[in-house]
Image (spheres, rainbow, N blue to C red):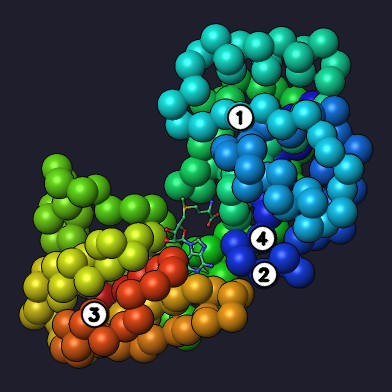
Amino acid sequence: MLSIVSTPIGNLGDITLRAIETLKSCDAIVCEDTRVTGSLLKALDIEKKELISCHGYTDNKKIDRIVERLEKGEHLVLVSDAGTPGISDPGYKLVSRVSELESIPGPSAFLAALSVSGLPINQFVYIGFPPLKKGRQTLFQSFVKEDRTIVLYESVHRIEKTLNEIADALADQPDRSVVIGRELTKMHEEVVHSTVATLKEAASSITKKGEFVVMIGPNR
Ligand code: SAM
């Protein structure tokens, strides 16, 4: 059995009871960065466990060895550094090879952000991180006609550039809502409400620290 365990995106209090139980009882934890997961275990007062590092660049042989252990009957857990494994994080390569899986759901930054956005969220499109070069402008242009809320991730290094490019792509829709969630669940949590018309101003004034989720309201 491989348990897919979501972990907090900032606030340790968001760990679930099932996540704690599962982390305590499993045989080993497959994680992105052993230091990050080691610190989480320590903060949760969970005794030391075998940590198996598995990230985006892990080769197939290592995945084979993890799958073999599962087939022998071990109970392993998959976590990422924060949030839900596989959501703009490693996980797919391993999860797609395993048949006996269970989900221990919990935090994910895009869900936390959408829930406080005030945008219609019955339907939404999750983009993850926009591409750095190829397909970037095509993606932003596709937002023009999108009639569902759009949610994407961006790093501190590119947040201003990305917001400016979205403002350019949607320039003909100045009233469209754009909401930016920064440092959600953390001490400096911030939700900035803007429109396309004021987005460049918001892009330059928003604090350039931490982690960001960008949401764009539907074209209606
Ligand atoms: N697996 C994670 C999830 O379920 O949300 C996402 C991991 S992805 C590598 C990291 C990105 O998620 C950050 O660059 C940021 O865009 C977003 N993110 C993670 N934590 C966040 C937070 N506390 N506030 C805002 N955005 C966050």
Could you tell me if the residues under marks 4 and 2 are in contact, i.e. CB atoms within 8 Å? Answer: yes
Q: Position of 71 compared to 214: left or right?
A: right
Measure how far apart labels 1 and 3 are at the Cα level: 36 Å
Tag 2 residue: 11
Residue 42 drawn above or below residue 174 = above
**Residue 23, labelled with which disc?**
none
Mark 3: which amino acid? Ala
Q: Reading the chain from its start, which is encountered first: label 3 or label 2?
A: 2
Tag 1 residue: 53
Name the residue located 14 percent from the left edge and 68 percent from the top edge: 165
Q: Position of 12 compared to 150: left or right?
A: right
Kindly tell me whether mark 1's CB lies below 8 Å from ligand 1: no
Tag 4 residue: 8
Name the residue located 76 percent from the left edge and 69 percent from the top edge: 13
Measure how far apart labels 4 and 2 are at the Cα level: 6 Å
Residue 178 position, x and y percent, is 31, 80
Mark 3, residues whose alpha carbon is within 10 Å: few (<14), some, or many (≥20)? some
Could you tell me if the residues under marks 1 and 3 are in contact, i.e. CB atoms within 8 Å? Answer: no
Measure how far apart labels 2 and 1 are at the Cα level: 23 Å
Q: Does the rendering let one see residue 139?
A: yes
Could you tell me if the residues under marks 4 and 3 are in contact, i.e. CB atoms within 8 Å? Answer: no
Tag 3 residue: 203
Q: Secondary structure at mark 1?
A: strand
